[in-house]
Image (cartoon, grey):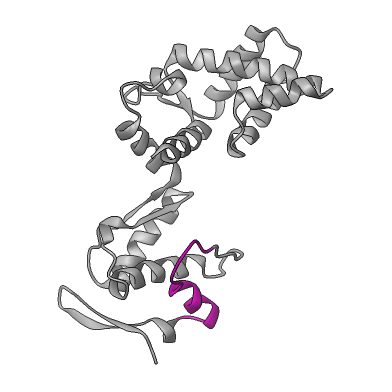
Amino acid sequence: MVAAATFQGGNRVGKLDFEGSLSEAQYAAVTHAKGPLRVVGGPGGGKTRVLTYRIAWLIREAGVSPENILALTFTNKAAGEMKERLQSLLGEETPVTAATIHSWAYRFLCIHRGKNAKGILGTWNPNAKNAILADARQYFAWQKAVQAAKVDIAPAYALHEVSRAKNNGITREALSRTAEQSTDHKLQRACRAWLEYERWQEKMKVLDFDDLLVLTNDLLGRK
């Protein structure tokens, strides 16, 4: 039996033919009932199509309120395309939150960081013009950190290792312990530079893009 949903937007009335519009694998993903599901595919493999149809199915078939759906992407272009596809698919303006993962994390931290936030989150000024470090300015910050730590290490190496640690959920303290227990002297120096980098961040009241994800994940884990 074909799963279909009636929609009405403006003067348009019709049905969404979920099963007929998707491959067998796509349909299985779109109608997945419980628990997380990872959709893997190369460029042009239909991942965005699956996600937009999944959102439409949740709204039309599962009765989920659009306000309770969050769709995150890596680029502004992808977020915009998803919104356009949803409107085209449903025939109406749908109040689903579709944003880049970093922009959503930024808004989340602005709202939920709380008055008692500590460290770089506590000193962060989200209203500042350059509240988020990126590219050349972040590299400059690492140059300053390496100099302050008085270690012989390339700023690019420290930036790379710390970024990798953050994205793997590894704190500065944990990485420092690992480095001290090993013979990796470069990593030990990177950890000392990381401490100075955080001190510089607190002084300048800024975060970097990795911080947005790490701190958001930390706050979500407490709730």
Vertically, is 148 above or below 41?
above
Horizontal side of 114 relative to 42 (left or right) equals: left
Which residue: 38% across, 89% down?
2
Position of the N terminus, as image quadrant, is: bottom left
Which residue: 34% across, 69% down?
58
Which span of residues is magenta-colored? 22-37
- Where residue 156 sits in the image (x, y, percent)? 68, 26
Q: Does the magenta stretch include residue 27?
A: yes
Which residue is nearer to you in this view: 93 or 30? 30
Vertically, is 69 above or below 219?
below
Which residue: 75% across, 23% down?
179
Which residue: 32% across, 84% down?
4
Position of the C terminus, as image quadrant, is: top left
Horizontal side of 140 relative to 213 (left or right) equals: right
- Where residue 172 sits in the image (x, y, percent)? 61, 24
Q: In the orientation shown, which residue stands out farthest toward the front?
A: 222
- State the count of labels: 0
Which residue is nearer to you in this view: 84 or 216? 216
- Where residue 148 sits in the image (x, y, percent)? 63, 7
Q: Is residue 187 magenta?
A: no
* Res 132 quadrant in image: top left
Which residue is nearer to you in this view: 35 or 19? 35
Horizontal side of 44 relative to 22 (left or right) equals: right
- Where residue 82 sits in the image (x, y, percent)? 39, 61
* Res 152 quadrant in image: top right
